[in-house]
Image: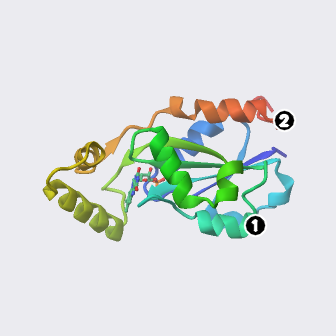
Amino acid sequence: MTSILIVYQSRTGFTEKYVNWIKERITCDTVRLDQIGNVDLKSYAKIIYGAGIHAGHIQGLKTFKKHVLNLVDDKMVIFATGAAPYDEKIVTAIKQNNFSENERQAVVFFYFQSGLNYEKMPFFDKLVMKTFSKVLARKKNKSEIEDGTSQAITQSHDHSNQEFIMPMIDYLKQSKVNTSTST
Ligand SMILES: Cc1cc2nc3c(=O)[nH]c(=O)nc-3n(C[C@H](O)[C@H](O)[C@H](O)COP(=O)(O)O)c2cc1C
């Protein structure tokens, strides 16, 4: 039995790619969020949840919370993947949007820049992104962030990089859980 479980949701494959990179570095079990009912959560020393961000919200986090009941537990680690480049302000905004005050103090959170994949996006997501992209492109006097976002979302791109996971890997290795890949 391994002591780390990664639960994840991935619509266009970016989060899954990060899960696979994490798996290469540490011993862990993985399960998609829609299969979470099939695993014994109590048997794991660490439970990691990862998913993409949509309009500032970590996909599936509410469902995940229903299963684990409490995010304020040193068992829990959350990560999110998003098209925006890593920035402390973005991390703060994601925490603000997704966690209660209590959770913000306690939750161990990591953010990994990914990209956009229009080819794999479900129809409705594609429609939302294309509409948002057009609205932003037409907007006058864009802020620096809006200008960067506008350029980034016009087409598919992939800025994911396995180096981004290293702070999480270091954190897990320093925790008293079995991360050895040789078992
Ligand atoms: C409808 C929609 C909304 C999105 N909103 C954001 C966002 O607010 N911030 C961000 O950084 N990326 C945003 N993205 C990009 C996704 O977060 C990114 O592609 C993510 O890695 C997808 O993960 P997945 O492929 O594992 O589902 C959005 C993508 C879609 C399709």
Q: Residue at 72% of width from left, 49% of height from top?
A: 106
* Location of residue 53 in the rendering, given as x and y in whole percent from the top left corner: 47, 56
Distance from the alpha carbon under mark 1 to that under mark 2: 23 Å
The residue that disc 2 covers is 176
Label 1: how many Cα within 10 Å (few below 14, some 14–19, many 20+): few
Element on which disc 2 rests? loop
Q: How is the image coloured?
A: rainbow
Horizontal arrangement in the rendering, residue 88 relative to residue 136 (left or right): right
Q: Does any portion of residue 180 appear in the rendered image?
A: no
Nearer the observer, 115 or 143: 143
Q: Amino acid at mark 2?
A: Lys
Label 2: how many Cα within 10 Å (few below 14, some 14–19, many 20+): few
> Which image quadrant shows ligand 1?
bottom left
Up/down of 43 relative to 179, above or below? below
Q: How many marks?
A: 2
Horizontal arrangement in the rendering, residue 85 relative to residue 182 (left or right): left
Horizontal arrangement in the rendering, residue 162 relative to residue 125 (left or right): right
Q: Residue at 36% of width from left, 57% of height from top?
A: 120
Nearer the observer, 147 or 182: 147
Location of residue 124 by image quarter: bottom left
Q: Residue at 79% of width from left, 35% of height from top?
A: 175
Label 1 close to label 2 by CB (< 8 Å): no
Nearer the observer, 8 or 69: 69
Q: Amino acid at mark 1?
A: Leu
Location of residue 126 by image quarter: bottom left
Name the mark on residue 69.
1
Up/down of 152 relative to 118, above or below? above
Up/down of 40 relative to 4, above or below? below
* Location of residue 92 in the rendering, given as x and y in whole percent from the top left corner: 52, 47
* Location of residue 174 in the rendering, given as x and y in whole percent from the top left corner: 77, 30
